[in-house]
Amino acid sequence: MKRRTGLSQKYLDHASMIVIVFTFILFASSLATKGLSHDLFLETGVLLVSVKLILNAYQMDAHVGRVEARIEELRTLLQQMANASAVSEEERA
């Protein structure tokens, strides 16, 4: 598993950081060129959708991590059960 350092890298991957920065730059430039008008709502919507997709990706990554940990626990238990079964069969023989 890839080791991450820093607060932002702990929660966001590089692609998410690029999307956030790019979307924020577009949002700020739209605000500077259009001002506080109706188009601001459209740009805000785009920003919020981008943030929502990134948060969903983070939540999915966290969920996958929990599932992988649980699968590893189950694999360990199955291995222990198989070893115990093999030992008991050897004792009977």
Image: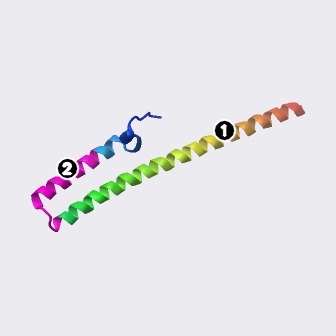
Q: Main secondary structure of the magenta part?
A: helix
Q: How many marks overall?
A: 2
**For this rendering, which residue is in front, 9 or 18?**
9
Marker disc for residue 76:
1
Residue found at x 37% / y 44%: 12
Q: Position of residue 27 (x, y in %)?
A: 20, 55
Q: Amino acid at mark 1?
A: Thr
Q: Secondary structure at mark 1?
A: helix
Q: Position of residue 38 (x, y in %)?
A: 16, 68
Residue found at x 45% / y 52%: 59
Ranked by sequence position, the earlier of labels 1 and 2 is 2
Distance between the alpha carbons at the discs numbered 1 and 2: 48 Å
Specify the farthest residue to the bottom.
38
Q: Position of residue 19 (x, y in %)?
A: 28, 48
Q: Amino acid at mark 2?
A: Ile
Q: Is residue 83 magenta?
A: no
Circle 2 packing at 10 Å, graded few (<14), some (14-19), many (20+), is few
Name the side, left or right, on which 88 lies relative to 11. right
Q: Quadrant of residue 83?
A: top right
Q: Are marks 1 and 2 in contact (CB under 8 Å)?
A: no
Q: Position of residue 70 (x, y in %)?
A: 60, 45
Q: Is residue 47 above or below residue 79?
A: below
Q: Quadrant location of the C terminus?
A: top right
Residue found at x 33% / y 46%: 16
Span highlighted in magenta in the image: 18-39
Q: Which residue is denoted by mark 2 in the rendering?
A: 25
**For this rendering, which residue is in front, 38 or 63?**
38
Q: Is residue 53 above or below residue 1?
A: below
Q: Secondary structure at mark 2?
A: helix
Q: Is residue 25 magenta?
A: yes
